Image (spheres, grey):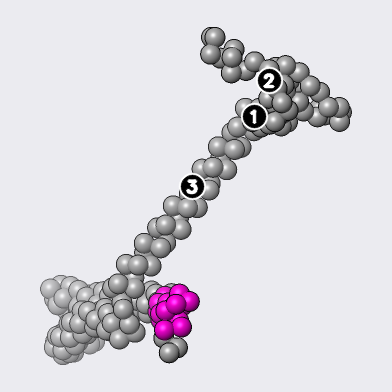
Amino acid sequence: MGALAAETAGSIYTCVDANGRRITSDRPIPACLDREQRELGATGTVRRVIGPSLTEHERAQLEAQKRKQEEERNRIADERRRERVLISRYPDRAAHDAERAAALESVDVVTATAVKRIDELKERRKTLDSEMEFYQKDPAKAPMKLRRELASNEADIEEQQRFIAGQDQEKQRIHKRFDAELAQLRQLWAARAAVPAVLPGGAAAAAAR
């Protein structure tokens, strides 16, 4: 208590209230809790500036602003990390093109398997259609096994066709992803290439010589 009293002894608080009046007191001024106050020493020097006391709503707003700023800093830091990973994985255009080609090739492989399966199903369909020729006048007399196999064959072909269409869409997604990456990488590559050109004064002079 004695130390605190000694520390605050001779302190003068001053502020300008909401009505523009300058108020001076030997203790914090209640009329200026919503605005800045100055604590002066005995010689008139400013010991400290006391900020306005915040309302609960103002504190909540300030905390929300701080959280938003922190989130933005984290977002920027995450983006920088992703950029470092990206340029490390693809140091040049050739590396990125090779990765794109590999991704497309994997889709082409499974698509080719589906195309081959359709060819096999169509060959089988020829045999089934040949058997159905015996029942052209009255298809209802065809054996149930034959009719079921025809229906199954048609359904299998449609399924493979849907699969191929899905793989075509996958290739479009791959191109879209790699195009977006390439646009970003071009900026990163350009920024990296520009770094050696920015030299300290001494280094630049030495390079000039």
The mark lying in front, picked from 3 and 2, is: 2
Dot 1 falls on a residue whose secondary structure is strand
Identify the main secondary structure in magenta.
helix
Residue shown at 22% from the left, 75% from the top: 156
Give the distance between the C-alpha atoms of the residues marked 1 and 3, in whole angstroms: 31 Å
Q: Which residue is mark 2?
A: 11
Q: Amino acid at mark 3?
A: Glu
Q: Is residue 188 magenta?
A: yes
In the image as oriented, which residue stretches furthest toward the top? 1
Q: Amino acid at mark 1?
A: Arg
Give the distance between the C-alpha atoms of the residues marked 3 and 2, in whole angstroms: 37 Å
Query: What crowding class fits label 1: few (fewer than 14 Cα within 10 Å), some (14-19), or many (20 or more)?
Result: some
Q: Which residues are magenta?
A: 187-206
Query: What crowding class fits label 3: few (fewer than 14 Cα within 10 Å), some (14-19), or many (20 or more)?
Result: few
Q: Which residue is mark 1?
A: 47
Residue shown at 12% from the left, 73% from the top: 145
- Against 186, residue 41 (above or below) is above
Q: Which residue is mark 3?
A: 70
Q: Is residue 206 left or right of residue 110?
A: right
Query: What crowding class fits label 2: few (fewer than 14 Cα within 10 Å), some (14-19), or many (20 or more)?
Result: many
Dot 2 falls on a residue whose secondary structure is loop
Q: Is residue 68 left or right of residue 191?
A: right
Mark 2–mark 1 contact, CB under 8 Å? yes
